[in-house]
Image: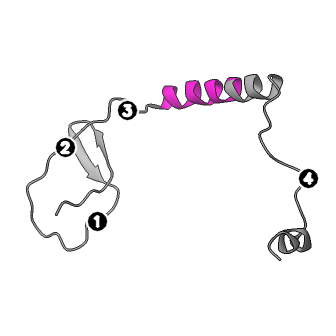
């Protein structure tokens, strides 16, 4: 059975972000995701996300939101 924990690779070292439970010593395999995120990427990603939301809203897509049903209205739906 394998255990997965997240970590960060920086300056030739890997730092685990959490401690694997029940593992004192083990062989490991390190996989770098294709879409590794850097500080600059997160800014670009946020800009693309905002652009996509704008496109959806202007296209008439219902993205949810207010007005929200009251608690009583939700209970009435299940009776």
**Sequence-wise first label, 4 or 3:** 3
What residue is pinned by disc 3?
Answer: 36
Q: Position of residue 57 (x, y in %)?
A: 80, 29
Tag of residue 67:
4
Q: Which residues are magenta?
A: 39-51
With respect to residue 33, does 29 lie above or below? Answer: below
Q: Nearer the viewer, mark 4 or mark 2?
A: 4
- Say which quarter of the image contains residue 37: top left
**Sequence-wise first label, 3 or 1:** 1
Cα distance between the residues tagged 4 and 3: 38 Å
What residue is pinned by disc 1?
Answer: 19
**Sequence-wise first label, 1 or 2:** 1
Q: Nearer the viewer, residue 73 or 13?
A: 73
Tag of residue 30:
2
Q: Nearer the viewer, mark 1 or mark 2?
A: 2
Give neighbour class at mark 1: few <14, some 14-19, many 20+ (Cα, 10 Å): few
Give neighbour class at mark 2: few <14, some 14-19, many 20+ (Cα, 10 Å): few
Q: Secondary structure at mark 2?
A: loop
Q: Secondary structure at mark 4?
A: loop
Cα distance between the residues tagged 3 and 1: 22 Å
Give yes or no for contact between labels 3 and 2 (Cβ–Cβ under 8 Å).
no
Q: Which residue is located at x 25 percent, y 72 percent?
A: 21
Query: Which residue is at the far bottom?
Result: 79
Q: Nearer the viewer, residue 34 or 73?
A: 73
**Sequence-wise first label, 3 or 2:** 2
Cα distance between the residues tagged 1 and 2: 16 Å
């Amino acid at each position: 059975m394998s255990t997965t924990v997240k970590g960060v690779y920086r300056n030739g070292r890997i730092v685990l972000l959490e401690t694997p439970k029940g593992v004192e010593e083990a062989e490991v395999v390190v996989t770098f995701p294709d879409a590794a995120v850097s500080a600059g990427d997160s800014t670009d990603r946020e800009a693309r996300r905002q652009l996509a939301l704008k496109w959806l809203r202007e296209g008439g897509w219902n993205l949810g939101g207010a007005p929200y049903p009251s608690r009583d209205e939700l209970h009435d739906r299940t009776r």
